[in-house]
Amino acid sequence: MANKFTRFLSGVGQGLTNPKGVVSDWRHGRRLFIDDTFRLSPRQKFLFYVNFELDKTAVRSTKFVDKHANEIGYLVKTADMPKYTFDSVLKNQYNRKKIIYKQINYDPINLSFHDDSAGIVNAMWALYYGYYIKDRHNPLAAYNSNHYRQTQTPQDNFRYGMDNQITVPFLKTVNLYTMSRRRFLGYTLVNPRIKTWAHGSGDYASSEGVENTMTLEYEAVIYSGGTVSIGNPKGFATLHYDTTPSPLSVAGGGTRTLLGEGGVLDGLESIFGDIASGTAFDSPGGFLSTAIKIANTYKNAKGLGKDQLKAEAVNILRSPAGLNAAAGIIGGVANAVFPKRDSANEQTKANQRVIVSQEGE
């Protein structure tokens, strides 16, 4: 009845001068974000990644750089994107108001980290602190009342504060990335320096995780973009990452459906994407992966029945969830399926609406 009532409202007064009738339904409200495979859909906050590029000569710990440098970015809990402020002045040009820029300011950003049980984040700060500040390496005896730092005094071998003679920055860059629809946008902070650092707090009345926070200053920002894959952007999904394809993805077997993750259309998109990008031919592993996708897509397409195709076609025409599925995956890494907002429940409800509509007709 609901669909018939909607069609009635749309049909009233149809013509060249009033094609939508007296009352339009709500469907026009979603066209902005769904059309053209979610091209204008908002990015989601949780799809972000941070990479810290450390200078090995400054860190003075090859083991830490080789083993833990990429893990620092994985432990970021929240991160601000770059911020800017222009200093401007309002001039009066023969009674005409004119805004003139004087300079640009790169506003500091805040990042918070999980205070991990292995102490990786704490170790990074300890290395940074010890690199810029000599106090960390002094024994307690250096702060006895009879020790005073004086120029050309051989008796006192201790250094204090920023008396460190450093030559290179500890952090080369800090790279921030946001992701959506298998692509990323990157923001590289040039010559970043830590302005503030705060360790977490203890609270017997709370079971929340401890976090560290820091504020970063930087001298400039470089923008970038590209396709998300293992190792692109740098360090992404290279550690502690399940690289075995999901059974719902095309490479992991896929599903015998026309639409949605792992469906036939998703499989064709992935195959042609590999061919267009050259992934299918740049290595034996890439060729094998593409061949597996072709085999799985062919198998799933062969298993589709006429009744199923008809039901999915009706679903596309009558339910927003069907259009969402037809648009394919909206974010993440190839061959990995990320959950969407209650997608399974929405799909079930959409199918129920189709059945009820068909019975009503």
Image (spheres, rainbow, N blue to C red):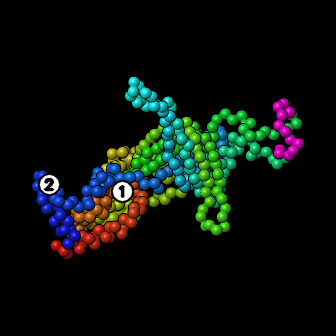
Which residue shows up at 48% across the image and 52% down it?
48
Q: Please tell me in which quadrant of the rendered image residue 258 appears.
A: bottom left
Which residue shows up at 68% across the image and 48% down it?
126
Main SS, magenta residues:
loop
| Residue 62 horizontal/vertical position (percent) | 65, 45
Going by the image, does 28 lie left or right of 69? left
Q: Nearer the viewer, residue 256 or 316?
A: 316
As for residue 49 lying within the magenta part, the answer is no
Which residue shows up at 43% across the image and 47% down it?
184
Residue farthest top in this picture? 94
Question: What label sits on residue 304 in the rendered view?
Answer: none
Going by the image, does 313 lie left or right of 334? left
Residue where numbered disc 2 is placed: 18
Magenta residues, as a range?
A: 142-153
| CA distance for labels 2 and 1 | 37 Å
| Three-letter amino acid code of the residue under disc 1 | Ile
Q: Nearer the viewer, residue 138 or 218?
A: 218
Q: Please tell me in which quadrant of the rendered image residue 167 appears.
A: top right
Crowdedness near tag 1: few (<14), some (14–19) or many (≥20) residues, C-alpha within 10 Å: many
| Residue 166 horizontal/vertical position (percent) | 69, 35
Q: Nearer the viewer, mark 2 or mark 1?
A: 2
Asked whether residue 292 appears in the rendered view, the answer is no
Query: Which of pointers 2 and 1 lies earlier in the amino acid sequence?
Result: 2
**Count of labels in the image:** 2
